[in-house]
């Protein structure tokens, strides 16, 4: 029953956003009693935390599928960030906006716990990109990942960017430019052939 509540609640959060969904709405939608809900979850935040664990576990597994068959690390990294942008600013926009603005600490906590695999993959890809000459040799992979994380958060979380109606456009002027700036001529040749971050 607990898994059923988590699965059904996550689907509602993804479809309608987090703020619009209450425990009472979930109780009605899942056709369960209040007693059943409160047997497993004392609050919406506690339920959301369990939903996020499932959400980020799935995202972590999805990273491997995204990069499968990529011809080089530049394409792999661009595919990963392109997918993240599609998720954050696509059909699940309300969910991600609510998550970023109202629950950033909870999001960070769950990402830290459940996205280790994806972070390790990104770090490894960046290290290979440096070794293979796609990225400048003096770069440190962990610092590159941290820089991209800061840029990504600037687009998805900070109040100063709320006024932009096309947040997806901001990724062209932040993440895409940063990725190009760390590329050698070899890496730039690949980036110039890609449109994944500028759609």
Image: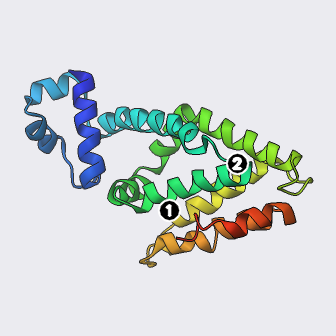
Residue placed most toward the observer, 15 or 20: 15
Callout 2 crowding tier (Cα within 10 Å): few <14, some 14–19, many ≥20: few
Q: Which residue is mark 1?
A: 156
Task: Point out the tag, 2 or 1, that comes first from the N-terminus.
Answer: 2
Q: Are marks 2 and 1 in contact (CB under 8 Å)?
A: no
Residue 49 point in image, percent of width and height: 38, 36
Residue at (81, 62) in percent of width and height:
183
The quarter of the displayed image where residue 10 is located: top left
Q: Identify the residue under disc 2.
A: 71
Residue 169 in the image: x percent, y percent?
A: 52, 74
Where residue 193 sits, quadrant-wise, is bottom right
Look at the picture and state if 65 lies above or below 169: above
SS state under label 2: loop
Horizontal arrangement in the rendering, residue 156 relative to residue 174 (left or right)? left
The residue sitting at 33% across, 59% down in the picture is 94
Q: Quadrant of residue 16?
A: bottom left
Badge 1 density bin: few <14, some 14–19, many ≥20, Cα 10 Å: many
Q: Residue at x 22, y 30 (%)?
A: 5
Q: How many marks?
A: 2
Out of 134 and 27, give the one closest to the viewer.
134
SS for tag 1?
helix
- In which quadrant of the rendered image does the N terminus lie? top left
Q: Give the CA separation, mark 2 to mark 1.
A: 29 Å
Foreground residue, 171 or 110?
171
Instruction: Using residue 44 as the reference point, say whether residue 134 is left or right of it.
Output: right
* Residue 157 in view of the camera: no
Q: Position of residue 88 (x, y in %)?
A: 44, 57
The mark lying in front, picked from 2 and 1, is 2
The answer, for residue 181, to whether it is visible in the render is yes
Say left or right for 34 vs 178: left
């Amino acid at each position: 029953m607990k898994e059923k509540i988590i699965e059904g609640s996550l689907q509602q959060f993804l479809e309608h956003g987090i703020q619009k969904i209450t425990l009472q709405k979930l109780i009605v939608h899942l056709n369960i009693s209040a007693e059943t809900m409160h047997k497993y979850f004392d609050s919406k935040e506690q339920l959301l935390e369990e939903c996020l664990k499932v959400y980020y576990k799935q995202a972590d597994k999805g990273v491997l599928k995204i990069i499968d068959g990529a011809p080089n690390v530049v394409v792999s990294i661009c595919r990963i960030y392109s997918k993240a942008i599609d998720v954050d600013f696509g059909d699940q926009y309300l969910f991600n906006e609510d998550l970023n603005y109202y629950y950033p600490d909870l999001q960070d906590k769950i990402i830290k716990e459940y996205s280790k695999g994806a972070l390790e993959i990104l770090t490894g890809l960046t290290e290979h990109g440096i070794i293979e000459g796609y990225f400048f040799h003096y770069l440190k992979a962990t610092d590159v990942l941290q820089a991209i994380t800061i840029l990504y958060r600037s687009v998805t979380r900070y109040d100063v960017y709320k006024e932009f109606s096309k947040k997806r456009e901001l990724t062209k002027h932040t993440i895409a430019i940063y990725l190009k700036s760390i590329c050698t001529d070899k890496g730039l040749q690949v980036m110039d052939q890609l449109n994944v971050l500028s759609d």
